[in-house]
Image: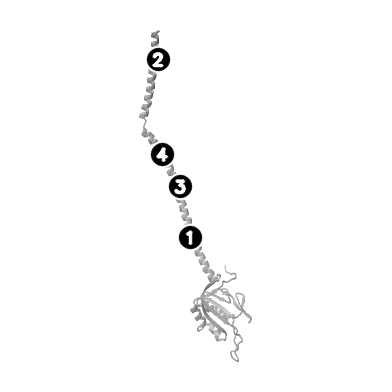
Amino acid sequence: MKIKIKKEKLVMSITIGIACFALMLVMFMQFNMVKQTDITGIETMRESELRLELSSWNEKYNELNTIYQETVGKSEEYKNERESYEKTYELLSKELEQLNKALGKTDVEGEGIVIQLTDKAGTQLSEDVKVKRITEEDLLIIVNQLFAAGAEAISINGHRVISTTSIFSIGEEFLKVNGERIVEPYVINAIGNPDYLKSTVSGKGGHVDALKELGHETSVDINKNIKIEKYEKELHTKYID
């Protein structure tokens, strides 16, 4: 009986020993595998993943930077176009303003002269001579002399004189300017160099002086602040394309 018990203990001890040995062997093998594992490889693998992630972000950055640069380029292009448009608009506005001034379509002011003609028609100069009325021809001559002397704007009794202005008489009763009736005294405003304008109409060969010699009452005064209103009617062309 004692021998049997000793055998069983021996077998159990051997079994336990083998189990312990096997366990230690497995642990040793695992430890050895861990020991032999390339830690640098693990770090390399993590670095690779980081590099891949960084590369991905770098690509995204490059894409965003490209979009940004394109946006900046378009912004500059739009800015240049806007500035160019504004400059073009400003230039055209100035040209239009100058054109309107030349056409008489804007109110203007400046220095020049004021001519006043008082018709003394019928006044007896002598037994046989009476003063003749001021005609549309007299006004046209004065207007032409003023333009020739550099007048930049002219009005007669408040009516702007432009290239298409008509001055004519209705019988011997009254004159019309731009289709509107005017009566004496005839007041002619002219903007320009006042000395040139005055010497042209008043000096030798000046028609204002000629009318004065014919018996009419005339005056020519320099004025530093003449205001001439724009031509109010529409400008029409019938045959010009």
Q: How far across and down, in percent of the image, does residue 12 sit?
A: 40, 15
Specify the quadrant of the image occupied by residue 118: bottom right
CA gap, disc 4 to disc 2?
Answer: 55 Å
Q: Quadrant of the C terminus?
A: bottom right
Mark sitting earlier along the chain (1/4): 4
Could you tell me if the residues under marks 1 and 3 are in contact, i.e. CB atoms within 8 Å?
Answer: no
> Label 4 belongs to which residue?
50
Q: Quadrant of the N terminus?
A: top left
Q: Is residue 141 above or below residue 72?
A: below
Amino acid on which disc 4 is placed: Leu
Mark sitting earlier along the chain (1/3): 3
Q: Nearer the viewer, residue 122 or 5?
A: 5
Amino acid on which disc 2 is placed: Met
Q: How far across and down, in percent of the image, does residue 129 sit?
A: 59, 89
SS class, disc 3: helix
- Of the numbered discs in the image, which one, if any, rests on residue 64? 3
CA gap, disc 1 to disc 3?
Answer: 29 Å
Q: How far across and down, in percent of the image, does residue 131 sit?
A: 59, 86
- Of the numbered discs in the image, which one, if any, rests on residue 84? 1
> Label 2 belongs to which residue?
12
Position of residue 33 in the picture relative to residue 104 (left or right):
left
Q: Is residue 57 above or below residue 152?
A: above
SS class, disc 4: helix
**Tag 3: Cα neighbours inside 10 Å, few (<14), some, or many (≥20)?**
few
Residue at the farthest front position: 2
Mark 2 or 1: in front is 2
Mark 1 or 4: in front is 4
Mark sitting earlier along the chain (2/3): 2
**Tag 1: Cα neighbours inside 10 Å, few (<14), some, or many (≥20)?**
few
Colour scheme shown? one colour
